[in-house]
Image (tube, helix red, strand yellow):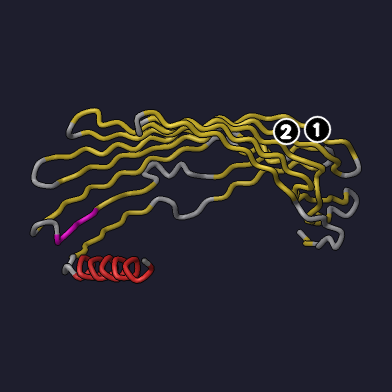
Amino acid sequence: VTEMGNPYLMPMYMNAFNFTHTYKGKISNSITYNKIKNVYFDYTIQNDSTKETIGTITNLNGRDVLAYDIFIQQNVFKWWITTFNASCIYFKFSGEIYDQKFNVESYSYYAGINNQFIFPKKTKLELSAFYSGPWRNNVGIFESRYNVDMAIRKSFLSDKLNLVIGCSDIFFTSIFRGNVDYLNLHSRSVHTSDTRRLRFTLSYNFGKLKVQQRQVKSNDDESRRMNH
């Protein structure tokens, strides 16, 4: 694929509006609306006779995004803390691609959960997961994906020594898969990386951080007295 620039790109402008409501510090709801003008759009041109493809960038007239987000944090029991967040998103694209009108509406959604289980002897188990539904980016459509993470935390010596053993993307499912099926372009792409990792962390707190924090607080207090 040959890359080609575009000296005629126009600046992109966005107007954003957000309304957020929090209930008892546990449930937070927000509604966001973004109206974007001259949104940047990466696309590919294909020459059917030579099979040559050229990647470039242009402006779409606009994109509208309306999203609803919810966040919940709850102590289910003394030994179980859970947080949950989810989003529902509506997209609308308008403009021209390959000198043809392009007007598309699309929806997407996302959900994630994190659980922390507290056991005796200062041991914690964290289990988290997320799921992202299929979503559209102009002419490209990305498939759904998900992953699951887990970690065990153990503290020793009055919380000075901390041990963490964890694994991210346990089932190796956080893979981007996309498809383009527009005019004479028909392609499929799969992007993977080493998202499945086993980590081992051992740390020791010598107490220096607390000394530094007290020093910063003392300096702040002195500054306030001088200002008054």
Disc on res. 103: 1
Residue at the image point whose x is 39% and y is 28% from the top: 23
Foreground: 228 or 74?
A: 228
Residue at the image point whose x is 81% and y is 49% from the top: 59
Residue at the image point whose x is 84% and y is 50% from the top: 46
185 displayed left or right of 28: right
Q: Position of residue 7 (x, y in %)?
A: 85, 63
Q: Residue furthest front?
A: 228
* Disc 1 + disc 2, Cβ < 8 Å: yes
Q: Is residue 40 above or below residue 119?
A: below
Quadrant in the rendering for residue 133:
top right
Give how far apart the Cα atoms at labels 1 and 2 are.
7 Å
Query: Which kind of residue does numbered mark 2 sit on?
Result: Lys
Disc on res. 92: 2
Query: Which kind of residue does numbered mark 1 sit on?
Result: Asn
Q: Quadrant of the C terminus?
A: bottom left
Q: Mark 1 vs mark 2: which is more N-terminal? A: 2
Q: Position of residue 65 (x, y in %)?
A: 66, 36
Crowding around mark 1 (Cα neighbors within 10 Å: few <14, some 14 to 19, many 20+) is some
Q: Is residue 193 above or below residue 181?
A: below
* Callout 2 secondary element: strand
Q: Which residues are magenta?
A: 160-164
Q: Position of residue 40 (x, y in %)?
A: 75, 50
Q: Is residue 195 above or below residue 77?
A: below
Residue at the image point whose x is 29% and y is 36% from the top: 115
216 displayed left or right of 36: left
